[in-house]
Amino acid sequence: MDRFTVGIDIGGTNTVTGLVDGSGNVVARETLPTAEYTDGAAFVEDIAQTILRLEAARNATIDGIGIGAPNANYLTGTIGAGTANLMIKEEIPICRVLREKFGVDTVISNDADAAALGERIYGSAKECDNFILVTLGTGVGSGFFADGRLVHGRDCLAGELGHMTLIPGGRECTCGRRGCLETYTSARGICRTFRELAETNASLLPGNLDIGTATSREIGDLANQGNSVAVETFAKTAEYLAIGLANAVTFSNPEIIILMGGPTKVGDPLLQPLKRHFERNLLYIYKGSVSIELSRLDDNDAAIIGAAALTKIKPHTT
Amino acid sequence: MDRFTVGIDIGGTNTVTGLVDGSGNVVARETLPTAEYTDGAAFVEDIAQTILRLEAARNATIDGIGIGAPNANYLTGTIGAGTANLMIKEEIPICRVLREKFGVDTVISNDADAAALGERIYGSAKECDNFILVTLGTGVGSGFFADGRLVHGRDCLAGELGHMTLIPGGRECTCGRRGCLETYTSARGICRTFRELAETNASLLPGNLDIGTATSREIGDLANQGNSVAVETFAKTAEYLAIGLANAVTFSNPEIIILMGGPTKVGDPLLQPLKRHFERNLLYIYKGSVSIELSRLDDNDAAIIGAAALTKIKPHTT
């Protein structure tokens, strides 16, 4: 029997459960549709069944379970009540349930923190003591290392860059507030910007495109085909994101900002204007000292590996 | 012989050197006119002579020297070349010189970081691993502790909260950018808000007041006398500051935000609306978990105490 660590990446849309070997390779994985769950107990039970299936398929024993999730509380082992990007609205005592079921260490942390840990151990930040990992997805998450350590904060809730107020009084956010960075730069935010731009430019778009349901990936494909509305959508997204990232730099003075997540796959239509606006937005003392990079890890791998690694370290040291 | 720590507060106009006892009291001090020095070596030599005089006068032994200064580099122990507010334009290797002369730990850091340390060792954050110190003055500075440690960043330039973009495209800032938090919430920002409000409300102000040159202290006095324009000035300042502080919370998840500096002396006209707006602006996961407090350290002593406190932390480990 081989020993593996379970890494679970809970996102607003999907939950990916993987088996991670001692070298940090994801050797097996299965996906659950997070968005279809409204009941916490059913969700955790299906995760447990997934782990059992993976164990059986690989003839594996597991030595720990690490979970990256939105609104995760490391101290209580739960996903908090009322999490903005989940349909499940009650508190989910996921660590207790899985620990009782599998009898191994079970740890949860913010999903972006886990991803940052993945970058630090296996990715673009191997040699880097000061960096910020930003995930663009259903929402916008972040995790940051400062002075060689992952920053946790009072309740392990540091790094909610997506809910920095970017435009006071701006777009309504799922969190109940207005103008959060993620309302402009998440996959949903990008679709919203696209719909706004498309309203007055429908003739510039392919006739067979349903503007109301176009995904950020479809918009990204259009941008890479040179469609001006899609290009403008990513240019505006870059402008917003550049301000948010430049603000983040004023806090922690990083040397790298690593981006991951679906919307970053578009490449140049986002990255080129982003780098330009970012450098222009930087306070002079930081100019030329911060690079923006795309994660070189497979998105799901980084999050799963990082989650698994949570079981190997003691994240909260105070 | 009593043991003291030397705290040195280097400002553009004056440099105050003090002896700090184990309880954080400044028991003796001497002032040098920074602005009269153009030669770094002569400046440091006169600081050394000051320390020797203070030692002799108090029959003291010193166990460390801490320095708070503009453009300070914690890692190299220097004040950088070309510092805007100093006449001395070459790099000043102040830590090396004083360390060699006195044979004790000698540490330098920027003023806001030193102030944060002062709060951690002697002030409102004694028991607090996660807090942000915000200084409102000519500008807005900040230093923050996360997980029990002062956050430095790549070049020890973390904590420039004053240059977070609060209002994209907003007020011009001395940094060359627009909409920075400090353009709304520094002493200068407060005066600017007051002048804007006074333009259409001059009849509501005392006839003998020169609106164009009114200081933030004068506006504060008016607010405490109930003048509606002054009250509104601080209410608007509070609204801006609340967004900036709530954004800061999304980064480091602190339990306390400590405010210091001239404009905070106004008290309730700033603090009451600030606490209200702050709580409203907080992301739901932080609501009710962050308090805003005024520094309890004496104004004249805080910078010296903070500088002395620099010697009480573990060295930067990276």
Image: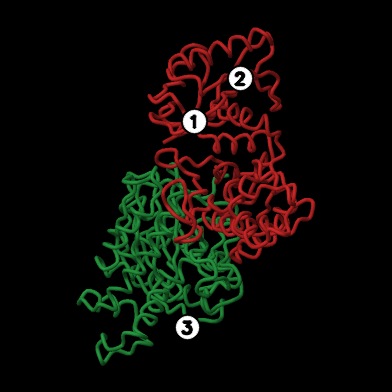
Chain colours: A green, B red
> Callout 2: helix, strand or loop?
strand
Which residue is at a point 38% across and 29% down the rendered structure image? Answer: B81
Which residue was labeled with disc 2? Answer: B31
In the visual, does B301 lie left or right of A225?
A: right
Chain ID of residue with mark 3? A
- Mark 3 or mark 1, which is nearer to you? 1
Q: Amino acid at mark 1?
A: Pro
Answer above or below: position of B72 versus A42: above
Q: Nearer the viewer, residue A8 or B214?
A: B214
- Per the rendering, the mark at residue B315 is 1
**Disc number placed over residue A183 in the picture, else none:** none
Assess disc 2: are there few (<14), some (14-19) or many (≥20) residues with their C-alpha within 10 Å of its C-alpha. some
Q: Is residue A285 visible?
A: yes
Is the Cβ of the residue at disc 3 closer than 8 Å to that at disc 2?
no
Q: Residue at x 66, y 16 (%)?
A: B3
CA gap, disc 3 and disc 2? 68 Å
Spatial separation of the CA atoms under disc 2 and disc 1 = 28 Å
**Dot 1: chain letter:** B
Name the amino acid, label 3: Glu
In the rendered image, the residue lying farthest to the left is A225
Of pointers 2 and 1, the one earlier in the residue sequence: 2
- The amino acid on which the numbered mark 2 sits, given as a three-letter code, is Thr
Would residue B133 be visible to someone looking at this image? no
Residue placed furthest toward the right: B225
Residue A139 spot, x, y in % from top left: 45, 70
Q: Report how far apart the C-alphas of labels 3 and 1 lie in the structure.
A: 50 Å
